[in-house]
Amino acid sequence: MDRHIARVNRTHLAVVGVLLVAGGGLAIVRGRGLLPGLPADQPLLNEAERAFARGHDWFWYAVAAGAVVIALVAIRWLLAQGRTGTIRTLRVDDPTGRTRLPARAAGRAVAADLAALPAVRRSTALLTGAPSAPRLRLHVTADARCDWPALRGDLTGTTLTNLRTALERDHIPARVRVRLADTGPGRDIR
Amino acid sequence: MTAPATDAPPAATGVYAARRAKTRAFRPQRIWPSLVVGAVLAAVMIAIAVAVVSTLAGRPVLALRPAPLVGRLTEVAWNDPAATGAAAAVVAAGVVCLLLACLPGRLRDIPMACDDPDVALALTRSGLRYALAAAATDVDGADSAKVRVRVRRVRVTVATPLRAPGALAAQVREAVGDRLRELEPARAPRVSVRVRRKNT
């Protein structure tokens, strides 16, 4: 899923942001003496608090456990960045039963379809999402002087229709990025 | 967004909503900020866990000894400028994280119109620049073209050897405009053309 990681990142960043703003804000408010019963000229860590930590072993176990949990969440968040979201198999449901296809073969078929178009110079097709609800991620390099309406028609019409037919699905959401590259003869284009 | 995550949800929600949803497919995913914030968070938490556990086990890791930090915390008061400054820095970092989470981010690609509600289509910025530069230099008298592309604005600067460029700017504007109408960005940008005399 293309937008899955974006959502994960936004949520994590928002939570971290809220906690930092709240923590820092509280510290500033406390430093101004605006919290009732908590004078501003006390040290950050007073004797009563140190005595509490010294007297209760569980406090330190709790601190360690909390740190480990947050570290694990952060590591899981980091690992999520490396995932491309591509899937290995596709599930095709037909009246006779269920078939599994390698997703890479479907991607190659799409790329081969595209390679046959005159304006297309290179293309990669990845299937993402879930085996039962695939999405297509397409990256195409085409001639800068190409007939765009024709290319767009071929991309969205023929190519995607072929894939939909092959996978027996009415809808396959697709994200298509096209890079137009200069192939003009002898022109100075920057 | 409460709807299921799709790169290009059906157009049933309205033309503008559909266009926004398609555009969203090309927004940045905030990978770099997440790597930085995630790494810092993980490092700090691992350091705390190691320091506490090793001290509990009776063999404190020397580099993470808490004594100097604890000493400092007992000396500095809440209204000390150092404490206020540190707190302000924490708030600033939090605001940066919130902005990264909330702002949509700059589009890397320029969304193109596409009738198929299942397809989110875009041209790379450099691709659109090439295509428009090619259109501009196809005009006689325009030797080279430099194009700057933004979602709502396209600036073309052409260089010409002609002493009297005359209608060149208008011709280039028309050529670029024709190509843009053909490419059909989801949002039509304004085109401005500048002509520069080439020193030969």
Image (cartoon, coloured by chain):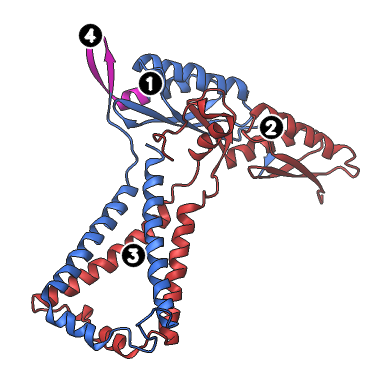
Chain colours: A blue, B red
Same chain for mark 1 and mark 2? The answer is: no
Q: Quadrant of residue B76?
A: bottom left
> What residue is at 33 percent from the left and 87 percent from the top?
A43
Separation (CA) of disc 4 from disc 3: 53 Å
Same chain for mark 3 and mark 2? The answer is: yes
- Front tag of 1 and 2: 2
x, y percent for residue A21: 42, 67
Left or right of residue A184: residue A10: left
Q: Which mark is residue A109?
A: 1
> What residue is at 43 percent from the left and 65 percent from the top?
B94
Q: Quadrant of residue B42?
A: bottom left
Separation (CA) of disc 1 from disc 3: 43 Å
Q: Secondary structure at mark 4?
A: loop
Q: Secondary structure at mark 1?
A: helix
x, y percent for residue B67: 22, 85
Question: What span is colored magenta in the figure?
Answer: A91-107
The chain under label 1 reads: A
Question: Are circles 4 and 1 on residues that touch, CB within 8 Å?
Answer: no
Same chain for mark 2 and mark 4? The answer is: no
Separation (CA) of disc 2 from disc 4: 49 Å
* Residue at mark 2: B180
* Residue at mark 4: A96
